Amino acid sequence: MSLKLNGVQTRVLLPFLFNSHSFSPQNTLSNHTFENISLWETHKIHNLQIYELLENVQNFLFDENNYWKVPDATVNRWFKNGVDVHFKKELIGHLKCLGIELFLLPSYGAGLLSFNFEHNLEEHQLKTLNYRISQRRSFTAPTFKLPVSEHPNAPQPPAIDVSLKERLGKAGGIFYLEELQNILLEPFKHSEFCVPYQQFNLFNTLKFSQLTNEIAHFNNEKLREHWQNLLFRLAHIEEETHPGSCQTTNTLLNPHHWVAITSLSTVHFLVDQTLPQQDNKIPFDDQRMSIVFNKYFVHHVVVIFQRLILQRFSQLAIDLNQQTLQPIRKQYLLFSINGYFTETSSREVINQYYHLTQQALRVEETFRTTQRIFRDVESNNDIQFQQQSAEEMKIIAKQLQESTDIVAHVQTKVEWLEVFFVSYYCSALAYYISYSAKFDCFVIGHLSYQTLSIIGWAILGGLFAFLNLSPHLLPHHHEHQNNHISKQWYETWQFKMFIVLFVWGIWLFVGTTFYSGCGKH
């Protein structure tokens, strides 16, 4: 209907994760070979891939050793002028390989492998190819085969059961895209290599040419209704027999550019502006396919990496603890600053496409979910830390109580000794006083005043120290009730002690006055 499909370019994508701490791209990929041929080389970035790309996005995506390609000579050796795609001996179509690229973010352990093809299949063939080429399982995936020469002396095709080395690049040699992927990504297999999706992702760019002398574009509602079924089928990667999906994330970036995006596939419909009978062809028509295939794709790569990295953070958060939380949280913060962009281009239309891709791949929801996971993990760790601290405090309090009891026990013994020492020194003082006054008269039986003074002072001194130090109350000094009792006792014995001292003073005065020097000498 006024438009004709005039060429398709397809990227078959494999997003993957790896352990960034055990992998060095420069050392590992540059030394990776197959049949003594180097498989990867660092390559100059396509001008369209960085054109109008913001500097911070470029630094995030294309840092040193982040972009690799299989050498063109190796790609030509494997695919030559194109390969036939079959499924169960049925020919689906003929594809030409445009190249094989590898995008890496080593600091985050994320990678994206891209097989780039072009073809001119009809609509019904395109639907079948789109579904089959996305399959990775051997019983649903298509086979690739170099066409067999019809020359009578041409070599026989290699058997299907021989090694990939003997089949790849040989006429009639059959191989699966999964096999080639395994060879190319073999260096990652020793670094916790993980593919999160069961299918290849697809990035399709379809170009349409005008059939009439009246400009046709996707602002035309009838034209959109006619091509909508194909757009949605390709975006959802549906089989030919599927009834068809009714809705997907899609928008018109301009009347000649219609895009639809799902979690597994992106489809761009492009329409030439040049009419069939127009003498002066609009130059942009020839550039449109390459611009979308390279320039728009880079912004798509940014979103794929954001999705991969956020999914990895969600997985890491499951096993986080107090020791591992902070390093992961710091890395997540760095990603939020350096890799989660509000915009990626200096052009508004590309920023619209970037946000549409984020919406379709649910990056914003995943970002919020990851933030919530980290908050919940931190809250849970705080609760566990508080519980652990409370248990430790109980243990410390128990140990402190035990230590206090020991100290109180020792202090009790010390104060009993102090009672003895006070008693002893009081009696010694009485002895020296009575000795100097020569108190030796017999007053009661055989007890002299001197003896009574020594015994009395000992008892008085010990009683004073005992009542003052209260060693019998020391183990229970921390109890409020005992403190209250001790205070009441102090208020009563103080007065009694004063009376005892007063009586003993009279005793001492009488003794020194009336008994000094009496008796035998």
Image (cartoon, grey):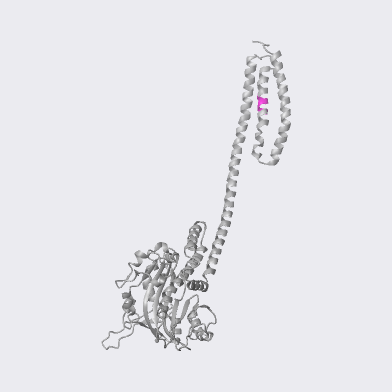
Q: What is the quadrant of the C terminus in the image?
A: top right
Residue with the most extreme top position: 521
Does the magenta run of residues contain 462? yes
Q: Position of residue 77 (x, y in %)?
A: 31, 77
Residue 208 found in image quarter:
bottom left
Dividing the picture into quarters, in which one does residue 283 lie? bottom left
Image coordinates of residue 335 in percent, x first then y, are 48, 63
Residue 350 visible, this orientation: yes
Q: Residue at x 51, y 69 (%)?
A: 363
In the image, 28: left or right of 358?
A: left
The percent position of residue 364, horizontal first and vertical second, equals 53, 69
Up-down relation of residue 343 to residue 266 (above or below) = above
User: Number of labelled discs?
Assistant: 0
Residue that sits furthest to the left in the current view: 153
* In-front residue for pair 168/60: 60
**Residue lying furthest front:** 280
- Examine the residues drawn in magenta and state their main secondary structure: helix
Taking the image as drawn, is residue 448 in sight?
A: no
Nearer-the-camera pick, 300 or 401: 300
- Residue 228 vertical placement versus 391 (above, below): below
- Quarter of the image for residue 382 reads bottom right
Q: Residue at x 48, y 85 (%)?
A: 216
Q: Nearer the viewer, residue 321 or 266?
A: 266
**Range covered by the magenta-colored residues:** 458-463
Left or right? Give the position of 513 relative to 323: right
Where in the figure is residue 390, as x and y percent of width and height?
59, 52
Asked if 491 appears above or below 379 in the picture, the reply is above
Q: Would you say residue 334 sits in the magenta stretch?
A: no
